[in-house]
Image (spheres, helix red, strand yellow):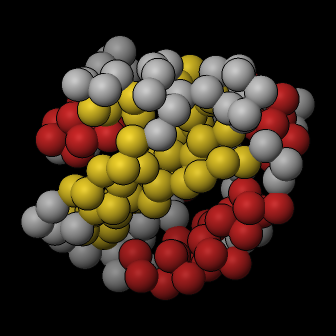
Amino acid sequence: MGSDIGSYYGIVPKLFDALWDRKQTAVCSAKVSKTAVECSPFSGTSEGGQTMIARIWQGRTRPGMGKAYYSYLEQTGLKEYRRTEGFKDVLVLTRDTGEETEYVLITLWDSMEAVQRFAGPEPERAVYYPEDDRYFPESERTPYVRHYEVVGAS
């Protein structure tokens, strides 16, 4: 695994440029379509002044399961994120690669303590749900996620 987040996740560099507005040095919330990225800046700190944490998970679905997985994700992970104290926002990025769909989830949290409320005592471990094996082959069920401090000011 390289240290370059863009190459690690195989995401188009323009997307990461949009997610990081270099003029304002602030991370932004993005809406992504096949032709454009709309970016709205927000501060890199939580309400208490702490640096926010970005948690990044990536996986590629089994052939033909991309859309079905999103419905399942709404019922499981996204629902659980929203119920967790300290959760701020999520970006769900998708990219069709032939018959498979690549997913990258970037969640934003008030602190590592908030991440632990969601992920448990080992926050670097990916959280999977009982039916995930239906959507992802074992080779795509990565055991770990990455965490980054969200730095910047508005």
Visible residue check, residue 55:
yes
Q: In the image, is residue 137 above or below residue 115?
A: below
- Answer with left or right where residue 65 lies relative to residue 73: left
Q: Position of residue 109 (x, y in %)?
A: 68, 39
- Answer with left or right where residue 30 lies relative to residue 109: left
Name the quadrant of the N terminus.
Answer: top left
Res 128 → quadrant:
bottom right
Q: Position of residue 26 (x, y in %)?
A: 40, 29
- Answer with left or right where residue 120 lies relative to residue 129: right
The residue at the point 15 percent across, 61 percent down is: 36
Q: Nearer the viewer, residue 99 or 72?
A: 72
Q: Nearer the viewer, residue 71 or 148?
A: 148
Number of marks in the rendered image: 0
- Answer with left or right where residue 9 lies relative to residue 97: right
Q: Nearer the viewer, residue 3 or 80?
A: 80
Q: Position of residue 4 (x, y in %)?
A: 30, 20
Visible residue check, residue 59:
no
The residue at the point 42 percent across, 82 percent down is: 67
Q: In the image, is residue 25 above or below residue 108?
A: above
The residue at the point 87 percent across, 41 percent down is: 117
The residue at the point 40 percent across, 76 percent down is: 66
Res 33 → quadrant:
bottom left
Name the quadrant of the C terminus.
Answer: top left
Q: Position of residue 98 (x, y in %)?
A: 18, 70
Q: In the image, is residue 100 above or below residue 68?
A: above
